Image (spheres, helix red, strand yellow):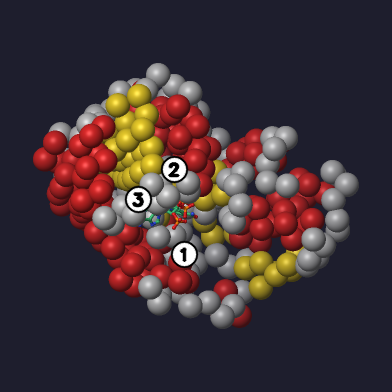
Amino acid sequence: MKILLLGNQGQIGKDLQKIIANDNHVLSSCSKKDFNFLNYKALTYHVSSFNPQMIINAAAYTKVDEAENNKELSYQINAKLPEFLAKYCSDKGIVLIHFSSDYVFSGASIDPYKEDSEMDPINYYGYSKQQGDLNIIQNHDKYFIFRTSWVYSEYEGNFLAKIIQSIDNNNNLKIVDDQFGVPTSSHFIAKVVLDIINNDKTCFGIYNVVPNGNTSWYEFAMYIYNKLKDNDTNSIKISKISTDKLDLAARRPLYSVLDNDKLRNISKIQIKDWRYYVDQLLQKDNYIR
Ligand SMILES: NC(=O)c1ccc[n+]([C@@H]2O[C@H](COP(=O)([O-])OP(=O)(O)OC[C@H]3O[C@@H](n4cnc5c(N)ncnc54)[C@H](OP(=O)(O)O)[C@@H]3O)[C@@H](O)[C@H]2O)c1
């Protein structure tokens, strides 16, 4: 299949590029280095020259706190770009794959969020992602919206990388223990996307793409630390802190656990507990450090 990947320098984009390029597809991909995706003239030229059967949009404004002060930019990237892509894809009969976030939910639930749970974001990033989802749903039929959460990867800048960096630098940490979600590796997400591309391409809709189980950020940090402790690492103190003690610009949902039943029903991949994917990444020779 001819696939155009937008945003090949983000966490998910990098792993998608690697995984799809190793498979039997004709892949073209680009990033902000090539052109600003909000330049619709350049984007249209790029898309029409390649003439793909599928577009994967892995580009997004993902800085949750900065979004509070950069509302217009985050709205343009997270809400208007998906709208443009949905209209373009609908017009040309192209399948659109897009990523959404657990932050479209308020976190007030006590049960895992399903794909059709009501969206009620409590910060601007979540609002802009919600608008992106709605703009796709309203303008296209052949779409996959993959909602995910707490994404980490072998690349820099994510939670797992920051924990490892703190251990390496002997810095003690305070981590919130009152926010619950599902840590999800970008490699896992890329494998799920490839599985769907290669198998049932017509089961369009929204899917929660997360492993099984859930945890708090504190337990996630402790899990990483305990896994690395045996490898001659520095001993650091990781203590608990509550979210209200942090001075963050954006509010966080306290419970953003996504239910993956719908995904498990269509996926040919056997989906495992979130810890399995952390172990997999930490076993890699070339992760982060
Ligand atoms: N990270 C998470 O924990 C998380 C959780 C739930 C859902 N998601 C969703 O998953 C998707 C991918 O997330 P990710 O973690 O892979 O994000 P990421 O690492 O921040 O990657 C996003 C990419 O989009 C690019 N981009 C932003 N604005 C652009 C523009 N105007 N033109 C071209 N490229 C642009 C960014 O480039 P620059 O860096 O150069 O701006 C970056 O390379 C997003 O839809 C996100 O909302 C992520």
Image height check: is 110 above or below 98? below
Q: Position of residue 69 (x, y in %)?
A: 40, 77
Q: Which of 236 and 211 is in front in this view?
A: 236
Rounded to the nearest whole Å, what is the CA distance between mark 2 and mark 3? 12 Å
Can you tell me whether the CB of the residue at mark 3 lies under 8 Å from the nearest atom of ligand 1? yes
Query: Could you tell me which residue is drawn at 40 percent across and 51 percent down?
Result: 32
Query: Are the residues flagged by discs 1 and 2 in contact, CB closer than 8 Å?
Result: no
Q: How many residues crowd mark 2 within 10 Å: few (<14), some (14–19), many (20+)? A: many
Q: Where is residue 83 in the image (x, y as percent from the top left)?
A: 21, 53
Q: Quick one: label 1 or label 2, which is nearer the N terminus?
A: 2
Rounded to the nearest whole Å, what is the CA distance between mark 1 and mark 2? 17 Å
Image height check: is 5 above or below 201? below
Query: Are the residues flagged by discs 1 and 3 in contact, CB closer than 8 Å?
Result: no
Query: Could you tell me which residue is drawn at 26 percent across and 32 percent down?
Result: 50
Which kind of residue does numbered mark 2 sit on?
Answer: Asn
Image position of 187 (left or right of 194)? right
| SS at badge 1 | loop
Q: Which mark is residue 35?
A: 3
Residue behind mark 2 = 8
Q: How many residues crowd mark 1 within 10 Å: few (<14), some (14–19), many (20+)? A: few
The N terminus lies in which quarter of the figure? top left
Q: Can residue 215 be seen in this view?
A: no
Q: Which of 11 and 216 is in front in this view?
A: 11
